[in-house]
């Protein structure tokens, strides 16, 4: 490669790395924590996820919701999450009279509330907000998005800088000389392990762009479906006025109908519409599949509880199927614990890159003096 070009790439690699270093450190650190979000949250808060004992029969969901609404003065039910695991509690997300979103964990056998937490103050909600928005809303999302794009360039330019000019130097680039000076070890650690983790970090970074830029998500649909238009996940409610019929088992019937439509083992979530136009969306995850995040949808009339539309995973467009795979790929959960551990270790290494890169820069300044 032309020496001048490589020098210019090195210049950009250095200064863009220094400019984005702090953001990369925060995003990589929070990302490594989020890899094991489910496991860590359940470990530290077992009472929120597990019932004390499995009862003979679960109570009707509507009866549970009615009691929780009365006890905590809830204004609106937003989501109801039921799990296939008989030991798991029922999760209810609702808005109270103070307009706070609350998450409740309820024993489905006894109806006892096991715990409650404001949705935004939940530990992993804060970590996720820090990971995606730096707890700064839209401005923070713009910063993390730019930093993510910058990091993609850093990975590609780092590979160019790592690439040896002569094949005989390849072995040297593939090993860390641990018995050398700190400056040499730091350089080797930064560049050598940067090469080994290059592909995984590039995949994590590129998939992360999905949550920062609409154009990236549109690009996924264009490549997969030939159109940048993403299929809407909303379905308009057919009934415009509430007929006010018997709703004693309204939610329970929706769960039962979903199970009759999709007979596989899975966790089911009812999502109430946030507006006055659309119908209830129900998502049932397929736990019988080896790959996570495979789910089918069903839509129900928010007044009558009748089925409005069925949208099975098999009917999804290629773009929708790829979009659902992006999350498990990004988090490392695509093939269970082996890929989770890999993602965790790679993210931890990414945390060190701004630090070792800073030491490389400081070492060069000292040399010039």
Image: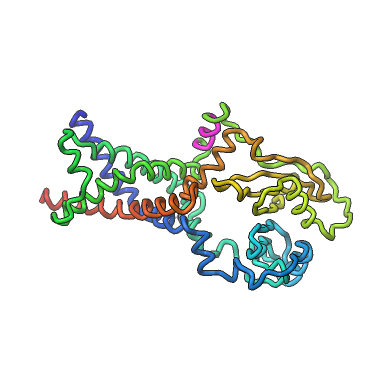
Find residue 272 and report its horizontal and vertical position in percent. Answer: 71, 52
Is residue 180 rendered to the left or right of residue 349? left
Whether residue 139 can be seen here: no
Provide the major secondary structure of the magenta segment. Answer: helix
Is residue 18 rendered to the left or right of residue 227? left
Residue 53's place in the image compared with 28, above or below, is below
The mark total stands at 0
Is residue 224 rendered to the left or right of residue 204? right
Find residue 150 and report its horizontal and vertical position in percent. Answer: 36, 42
Which residue sits at x=63%, y=49%? 285
Between residue 178 and residue 163, name the one nearer to us: 178
Find residue 284 and report its horizontal and vertical position in percent. Answer: 66, 49
Whether residue 120 can be seen here: yes
Which residue sits at x=49%, y=47%? 334
Q: Quadrant of residue 233?
A: top right
Q: Quadrant of residue 49?
A: bottom right
Is the N terminus in the top left, top right, bottom left or bottom right quadrant?
A: top left
- Please say whether residue 303 is one of the residues in the magenta stretch: no
Q: Which residues are magenta?
A: 216-222
Which residue sits at x=74%, y=45%? 261
């Amino acid at each position: 490669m032309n020496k001048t070009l490589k020098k210019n790439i090195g210049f950009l690699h250095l200064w863009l790395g220094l400019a984005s270093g702090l953001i990369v450190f925060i995003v990589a650190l929070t990302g490594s924590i989020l890899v094991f979000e489910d496991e860590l949250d359940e470990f530290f808060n077992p009472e929120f996820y597990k019932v004390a004992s499995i009862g003979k029969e679960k109570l009707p969901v509507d009866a549970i919701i009615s009691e929780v609404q009365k006890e905590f003065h809830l204004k609106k039910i937003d989501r109801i999450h039921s799990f296939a695991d008989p030991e798991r509690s029922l999760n209810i997300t609702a808005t109270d009279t103070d307009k706070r979103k609350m998450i409740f964990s309820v024993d489905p056998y006894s109806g006892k509330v096991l715990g409650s937490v404001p949705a935004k103050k939940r530990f992993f909600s804060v970590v996720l907000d820090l990971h995606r928005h730096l707890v700064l809303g839209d401005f923070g999302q713009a910063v993390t998005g730019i930093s993510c794009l910058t990091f993609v360039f850093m990975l590609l330019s780092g590979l160019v800088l790592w690439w040896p000019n002569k094949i005989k130097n390849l072995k040297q680039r593939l090993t860390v000389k641990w018995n050398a000076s700190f400056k040499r070890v730091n350089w080797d650690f930064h560049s050598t392990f940067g090469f080994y983790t290059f592909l995984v970090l590039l995949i994590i970074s590129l998939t992360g762009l999905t949550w920062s830029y609409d154009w990236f998500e549109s690009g996924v649909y264009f490549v997969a479906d030939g159109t940048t238009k993403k299929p809407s996940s909303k379905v308009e409610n057919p009934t415009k006025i509430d007929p006010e019929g018997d709703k004693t088992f309204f939610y329970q019937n929706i769960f039962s109908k979903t199970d009759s439509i999709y007979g596989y083992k899975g966790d089911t979530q009812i999502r109430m519409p946030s507006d006055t136009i659309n119908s209830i969306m129900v998502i049932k995850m397929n736990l019988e599949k080896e790959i996570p995040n495979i789910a089918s949808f069903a839509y129900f009339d928010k007044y009558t509880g009748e089925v409005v539309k069925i949208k099975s995973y098999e009917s999804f467009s290629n773009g929708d199927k790829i979009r659902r795979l992006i999350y498990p790929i990004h988090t490392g959960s695509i093939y269970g614990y082996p890929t989770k551990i890999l993602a965790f270790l790679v993210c931890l290494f990414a945390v060190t890159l701004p630090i070792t890169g800073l030491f490389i820069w400081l070492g060069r300044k000292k040399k010039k003096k």
